[in-house]
């Protein structure tokens, strides 16, 4: 019988990932709805991503991959908003 060591999970990184993805999906909604929903969720994801990155680095890099993807989603969301996504029809 093999005993497996429990994997170190970084729940904050996964929360940042899902908030970032939701922000990216909601950003294209016109008439400032996407700006408010997508931009707000991406700001929350950015804060969570910084916390998760610091937590992951203190754990020798455990759970950094979802944080990197969250950062990509956040960058895409902010780029879309900067180009008029979620603001105008």
Image (spheres, rainbow, N blue to C red):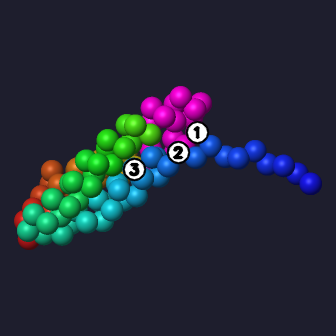
Mark in front: 1 vs 2: 2
- Numbered label attached to residue 45: none
Pick the residue in front: 75 or 52: 52
Q: Residue at x 15, y 50 (%)?
A: 82
Residue farthest to the right? 1
Tell me the SS state at disc 1.
Answer: loop
Tell me the SS state at disc 2.
Answer: loop
Q: Is residue 5 left or right of residue 31?
A: right
Q: Which residues are magenta?
A: 53-69
Q: Are marks 1 and 2 in contact (CB under 8 Å)?
A: yes
Q: Are marks 2 and 3 in contact (CB under 8 Å)?
A: no
Q: Residue 22 falls in which quadrant of the image?
A: bottom left
Is the residue 32 above or below the residue 77 in the image?
Answer: below
Give the x, y percent position of residue 5: 75, 44
**Residue 86 forms part of the magenta stretch:** no
Q: Which quarter shows the C terminus?
A: bottom left
Indicate which disc, 2 or 3, sits on the residue closer to the N terminus: 2
- Numbered label attached to residue 16: 3
Give the x, y percent position of residue 11: 50, 49
Dot 3 alpha-carbon crowd within 10 angstroms: few under 14, some 14 to 19, many 20 or more? many
Q: Residue at x 42, y 53 (%)?
A: 15
Q: Residue at x 40, y 58 (%)?
A: 18
Indicate which disc, 1 or 2, sits on the residue closer to the N terminus: 2
Residue position for label 2: 10
- Numbered label attached to residue 62: 1
Indicate which disc, 3 or 1, sits on the residue closer to the N terminus: 3
Q: Residue 80 falls in which quadrant of the image?
A: bottom left
């Amino acid at each position: 019988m093999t005993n497996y060591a429990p994997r170190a999970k970084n729940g904050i990184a996964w929360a940042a990932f899902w908030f970032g993805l939701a922000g990216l999906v909601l950003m294209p909604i016109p008439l400032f709805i996407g700006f408010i929903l997508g931009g707000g969720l991406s700001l929350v994801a950015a804060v969570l991503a910084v916390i998760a990155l610091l937590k992951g680095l203190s754990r020798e890099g455990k759970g950094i991959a979802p944080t990197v993807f969250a950062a990509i989603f956040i960058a895409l969301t902010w780029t879309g908003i900067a180009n008029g996504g979620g603001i105008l029809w």
